[in-house]
Image (tube, coloured by chain):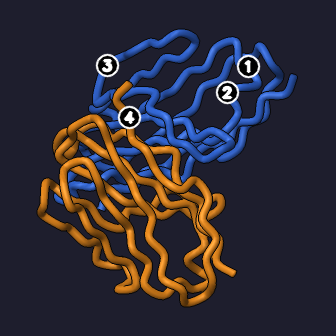
Chain colours: A blue, B orange
Amino acid sequence: GIQVEQSPPDLILQEGANSTLRCNFSDSVNNLQWFHQNPWGQLINLFYIPSGTKQNGRLSATTVATERYSLLYISSSQTTDSGVYFCAVYGGSQGNLIFGKGTKLSVKP
Amino acid sequence: DAMVIQNPRYQVTQFGKPVTLSCSQTLNHNVMYWYQQKSSQAPKLLFHYYDKDFNNEADTPDNFQSRRPNTSFCFLDIRSPGLGDAAMYLCATSRGEQETQYFGPGTRLLVL
């Protein structure tokens, strides 16, 4: 089945810094989502982005489907950005959302 | 606001005592999912419904069952919880298969 790898696994930032999170996937995908899991455990949709670039406030994402990767950019980070960021893809015959292991982000004041 | 609701947010049960977690949605989505998430791991799909069609993942233990009595509600039944079943249980919905999934806030289950 499709493999999803996220990097880095852990990231510590000072408030106000920018960061880039990466998601690599091993095969063609039909869809890709980025989620933020807050400290209370809720998974919040950030982007549905099978290809191209999208922006939402301080966050933006780019998926290059032909090269099998997606990037999530966080600018001017805030302490409320802390949590785990998951990339998840649909693809192949499995039909289910396949999650990466996540990037744990800690933003220090 | 359209949303996915899970109750209760925290559930404590005893070893071997059946427990039911509930999920409801106001999105009128066709597909509802149940995931299990253990500490520092990604969510793991247990099963999903497309309308009334039930789809069980191959490695979901028989101890876990689900019911979807109507479009809006879906239940997760754990028949005989073990200590290893302590986890966050997440419900999600999507309009169709392979479409954007929307998650509820989760129910954190503790087994004593």
Q: Nearer the viewer, mark 3 or mark 1?
A: 1
- Tell me if residue A9 comes above or below residue A68 in the rendering: below
Image coords of residue A58 (percent x, y): 58, 12
- The kind of residue on which mark 2 rests is Asp
Which corner quadrant of the image does residue A69 belong to? top left
Kindly identify which chain the residue marked by label 4 belongs to.
B
Q: Residue at x 40, y 26 (%)?
A: A47
Residue under circle 3? A52
Q: In this view, does A102 lie to the left or right of B21?
A: right
Are the residues under marks 3 and 1 on the same chain? yes
CA distance for labels 3 and 2: 23 Å
> Is residue B97 rendered to the left or right of residue A87?
left
Q: For the residues labelled 2 and 1, say whether their Cβ atoms are less than 8 Å apart.
A: yes
Measure the alpha-carbon separation of dots 3 and 1. Answer: 26 Å
CB atoms of marks 1 and 4 within 8 Å: no
Residue type beneath disc 3: Gly
In the picture, the quarter occupied by the N terminus of chain A is: bottom left
Exactly how many numbered labels are in the figure?
4
| C-alpha separation, residue under disc 1 versus residue under disc 4 | 26 Å
Residue at mark 3: chain: A
Q: Where is residue B78 in the image (x, y as percent from the top left)?
A: 44, 78
Judging by the rendered image, the residue that carries numbered circle 1 is: A78
Instruction: Return the residue at label 4.
Output: B3
